[in-house]
Image (spheres, grey):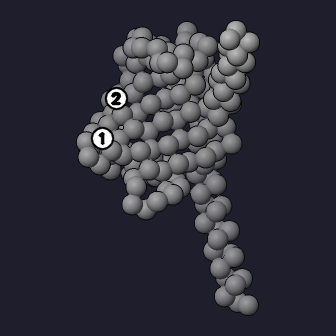
Amino acid sequence: MKKLLLSLVLILVCYTVRAQNVKALDEKNGFRDARFWADTTAIKDLVYLTTSQDRIRYYKRTSDSPSIGNAQVDISYGFYKGRLMAVVLTTNSASYLLDALKASYGPGIQNNRYIPEYFWLGQQVYMSFKEDTALHTAQAVIISRTMQKQQEEDNKKAAEKAKAEL
């Protein structure tokens, strides 16, 4: 009985520690000084890069520091309907970026210990990290869950409209 109680306490403590870190991700609700839902005019020094197939316009900030800890990163900001929805971090320093993410937000969830892919699931913000071990690159994506839901709803409406046009 004591072992069961001790196990439950340890699980609760581990869950609480992880929750506190994910809570920090939700509290940040963006990246550096850029907050999700911010308008393109609210974020300085944006330079347009491209528009994705799903209508997200990506920009780079000329004033961004290209490093996070020891990782050199390429940072792009994704806007949906003129509002910040996602931040994409790309690097050739995968382990350094992963270390920084874990230090800031906890260990994350790794579904398969053999695949270098991690997830942090906040109430408002979702973050993923995926390493391509063959190319020695990695990408972390920080995304507003509410903006993502809005985009999904818009896509469903567009599909229904297209269905009516067939």
Image coordinates for residue 121, horizontal then vertical, percent: 61, 46
Judging depth in this view, the residue of 101 and 55 nearest the camera is 55
Numbered label attached to residue 99: none
Judging depth in this view, the residue of 138 and 115 nearest the camera is 115
| Mark 1 vs mark 2, CA separation in Å | 11 Å
- Category of crowding for the residue at label 1, using alpha-carbon neighbours closer than 10 angstroms: few (below 14), some (14–19), many (at least 20): some
Q: Quadrant of residue 41?
A: top right
59 sits to left or right of 150? left
Residue 43 higher or lower than 128, as above or below = above
Q: What kind of residue is marked 1? A: Thr
Image coordinates for residue 51, horizontal then vertical, percent: 46, 14
Residue 80 higher or lower than 29, as above or below = above
Q: Residue at x 43, y 62 (%)?
A: 113
Please report whichever mark, 1 or 2, sits nearer to the chain's N-terminal start: 2
Residue beneath label 2, please? 74
Image coordinates for residue 144, horizontal then vertical, percent: 61, 31
Residue beneath label 1, please? 137
Say whether residue 67 is visible. Answer: no
Q: In which quarter of the image is the C terminus?
A: top right
Q: Which residue is drawn at 55% across and 12% down?
A: 40
Q: What kind of residue is marked 2? A: Asp
Q: Residue furthest front?
A: 166
Image coordinates for residue 1, horizontal then vertical, percent: 73, 90
CB contact under 8 Å: marks 1 and 2 = no
155 sits to left or right of 91? right
33 sits to left or right of 114? right
Q: In which quarter of the image is residue 19?
A: bottom right
Q: Which residue is drawn at 46% across and 60% down?
A: 112
Say whether residue 158 is visible. Answer: yes
* Secondary structure at numbered mark 2: strand
